């Protein structure tokens, strides 16, 4: 169900808690996302253990973002637990802010473990040198809401002939990251997410940001209260 919520007016973020019982946490939760990254605590965080394959399965315009579905086999290991990469998608402007400042865009890599817990790797996107993978997403993104469209260069990776929208290409060179416990940034805002936000942004072409903005000018939830949480910084 995609029709009943959005980013402005009666279906906007301040009304998400009224959508249904499951979404009540959007308004009453105490561990909501996104947040402003302000005060952080230096910690001995392990380097992110990301093992993503280069290719993708399908791309979809789901009515609130452009999402790239990923074939099985890409993983993230966190606290000794294995998470599978399901999809990645984009927000404009960024949902997380740093010192009160938003970035032009943010990409979220959504992983799930066997117990249903989620780990989302977020990467802030800034305008600069082009990123070939993001250019490919922009070139392939469906202009209207609809079913997933297969993308060439998909599973099995070894047979990929076309250059894929390699998710690894969205990772910045510097591997420092922030970690905190939070939620889905869209309804039902479930507080089941380990957030891993890369500290360094990745550069993408301004023209590609503009092309995305023609479809989704604003699909970012406002920042939420930190409450009793702490943001760790490490990697
Ligand atoms: S995020 O990374 O916190 N922005 C979901 C995953 C990650 C984030 C937000 C939401 C998610 O899995 N939501 C439930 C599934 N969606 C499905 C969908 O593909 O498109 C259901 C829905 O909204 O009600 Cu539309
Ligand atoms: Zn997201």
Image (tube, rainbow, N blue to C red):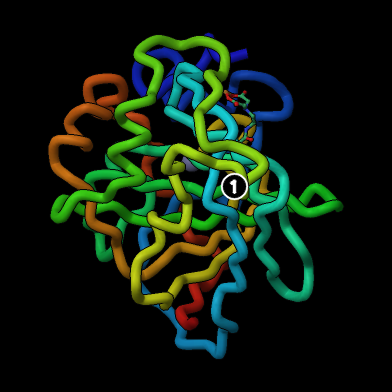
State the residue in front, 41 or 130.
130
Residue 127 image offset from top left, x and y in percent: 16, 50
Residue sitting at 28 percent across and 52 percent down?
125
Residue 213 vertical placement versus 119 (above, below): above
Residue 142 image offset from top left, x and y in percent: 40, 17
Residue sitting at 25 percent across and 26 percent down?
217
Hey, which quadrant is residue 211 in on the image?
top left
Residue 114 vertical placement versus 198 (above, below): above
Relative to 25, is 174 on the left or the right? left
Q: Residues within 10 Å of mark 1 (few under 14, many from 20)?
A: many
Quadrant of picture, ligand 1 = top right
Q: Residue furthest right?
A: 115
Relative to 111, is 68 on the left or the right? left
State the residue in front, 45 or 47.
47
Residue 177 image offset from top left, x and y in percent: 45, 72
Hey, which quadrant is residue 20 in on the image?
top right
Hey, which quadrant is residue 128 in on the image?
bottom left
| Mark 1: secondary structure | strand
Residue 151 vertical placement versus 34 (above, below): above
Residue 41 image offset from top left, x and y in percent: 46, 83
Residue 104 vertical placement versus 214 (above, below): below
* Image quadrant in which the N terminus is located: top right
Residue sitting at 23 percent across and 56 percent down?
203
Residue carrying label 1: 110
Label 1 CB less than 8 angstroms from ligand 1: yes
């Amino acid at each position: 169900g995609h029709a009943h919520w959005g980013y402005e007016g009666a279906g906007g973020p301040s009304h998400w808690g009224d959508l249904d019982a499951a979404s009540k946490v959007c308004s009453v939760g105490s561990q909501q996302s996104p947040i402003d990254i302000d005060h952080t605590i230096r910690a001995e965080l392990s380097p992110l253990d990301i093992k993503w394959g280069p290719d993708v399965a399908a791309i979809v315009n789901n009515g609130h973002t452009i999402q790239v579905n990923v074939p099985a086999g890409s993983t993230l290991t966190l606290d000794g637990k294995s998470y599978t990469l399901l999809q990645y998608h984009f927000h404009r402007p960024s949902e997380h802010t740093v010192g009160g400042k938003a970035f032009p865009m943010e990409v979220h890599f959504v992983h799930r473990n066997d117990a249903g817990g989620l780990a989302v790797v977020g990467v802030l996107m800034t305008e600069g040198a082009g990123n070939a993978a993001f250019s490919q997403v922009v070139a392939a993104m469906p202009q209207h809401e609809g079913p997933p469209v297969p993308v060439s260069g998909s599973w099995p990776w070894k047979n990929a002939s076309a250059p894929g929208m390699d998710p690894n290409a969205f990772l910045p060179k510097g591997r420092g990251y922030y970690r905190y416990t939070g939620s889905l940034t869209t309804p039902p805002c479930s507080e089941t997410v380990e957030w891993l936000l890369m500290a360094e942004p990745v550069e993408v072409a301004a023209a590609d940001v503009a092309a995305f903005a023609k479809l989704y000018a604003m699909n970012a939830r406002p920042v939420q209260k930190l409450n009793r949480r702490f943001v760790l910084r490490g990697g």
